[in-house]
Image (cartoon, grey):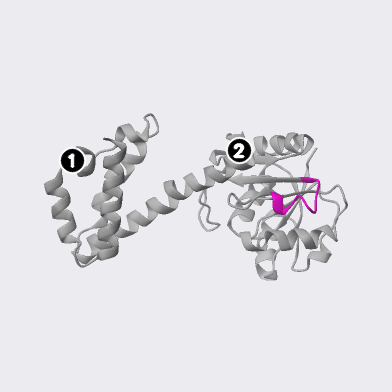
Amino acid sequence: MIKKLTFIGSGNVASHMAMAAHRQEYTIVDIWSRNIANAQHLAKRVEASATDQLQQLRTIADLYIIAVPDDYIEAIAQQLHARLPKRARVIHTSGATSLSVLTPYFSMAGVIWPLQSLSKTKKLNFQKVPLCITSQSATLQKYLTALCQSLSQQVQLINEEQKQILHLAAVFANNFTNHMYSIAHELCSEQQVDFELLQPLITETAAKIKANKPSRMQTGPAVRGDQQSMAAHQKLLQQKQDIHQLYQLISDHIQKLNS
């Protein structure tokens, strides 16, 4: 059973997960951060101790959650290996980083990946955040499932290959889509057009794919084969070669998928 948690990290994921666990009456033992002020801020909110020294982490937690930038996960795991008991349960929270960065150091290793874009300055209902679990240990998988089911209404067991593809899909669905919003905002701003006029369209597009396959909901000049409209758009983008090329590439791909 997992009742006591320690968080290595105090950023977006650690903040939301620690507060969600605290609300469910889990004991948060320690919060570690390289920035002691950040550790103290989160620790105060979840009634934990704060530290900026990994060697000061107490060894009484049932689960150690590494929630730091991807490039630092393995280095943190290596340092924890010298500090924690041999059978310590250790996980990270990254969708992009493999479970294999932990397995050389801990036999009870796993991943809990919140499949959501999180910001500690923005409130959200953590019960609605999908939590994806990966572990090679059936015992740890059982413990992590129980923990996640107390924090979220959406819990999914996935293997390493599925996690990698799901993270790639999330980049297309979230990061790349947001970049398209940025381009649209730039185009509107240049002509002093209110970007808010596009908000109903954005909302409706997102709503439609809840009940329908996205490819079936595709609209626009590319799927219609409206060459005249596409030529007019490309003419408007003549001074923006990078966006012009992006427009052409995406239009070609839409037409290929719908041919």
Q: In terms of secondary structure, where does tag 1 sit?
A: loop
Q: Position of residue 244 (x, y in %)?
A: 25, 59
How much space separates mark 1 and mark 2, taking CA atoms?
A: 44 Å
- Amino acid type at mark 2: Ser
Q: Nearer the viewer, mark 1 or mark 2?
A: 1
Q: Position of residue 243 (x, y in %)?
A: 28, 60
Q: Is residue 113 above or below residue 79?
A: above
Screen quadrant of the N terminus: top right
Task: Look at the magenta stretch and give its main secondary structure.
Answer: loop
Residue 94 horizontal side relative to residue 138, left or right: left
Residue 104 lies within the magenta run: yes
Q: Position of residue 227 (x, y in %)?
A: 14, 46
Q: In terms of secondary structure, where does tag 2 sit?
A: loop
Residue drawn at (50%, 51%), measured in percent from left and top?
117
Looking at the rendered structure, which numbered label has been put on residue 138? none
Mark 1: few, some, or many residues within 10 Å (few <14, many ≥20)? some
Q: Is residue 195 above or below residue 128?
A: below
Screen quadrant of the C terminus: top left
Residue drawn at (81%, 61%), measured in percent from left and top?
57
Residue 109 appears in view: yes
Residue 115 appears in view: no
Q: Position of residue 135 (x, y in %)?
A: 71, 41
Mark 2: few, some, or many residues within 10 Å (few <14, many ≥20)? some
Q: Which residues are magenta?
A: 100-108
Residue drawn at (53%, 43%), measured in percent from left and top?
165
Residue 13 lies within the magenta run: no
- Amino acid type at mark 1: Gly
Q: Earlier in the sequence, mark 1 or mark 2?
A: 2
List the residue tagged with mark 2: 152
Residue drawn at (86%, 47%), measured in percent from left and top?
87
Q: Is residue 136 above or below residue 57?
A: above
List the residue tagged with mark 1: 225
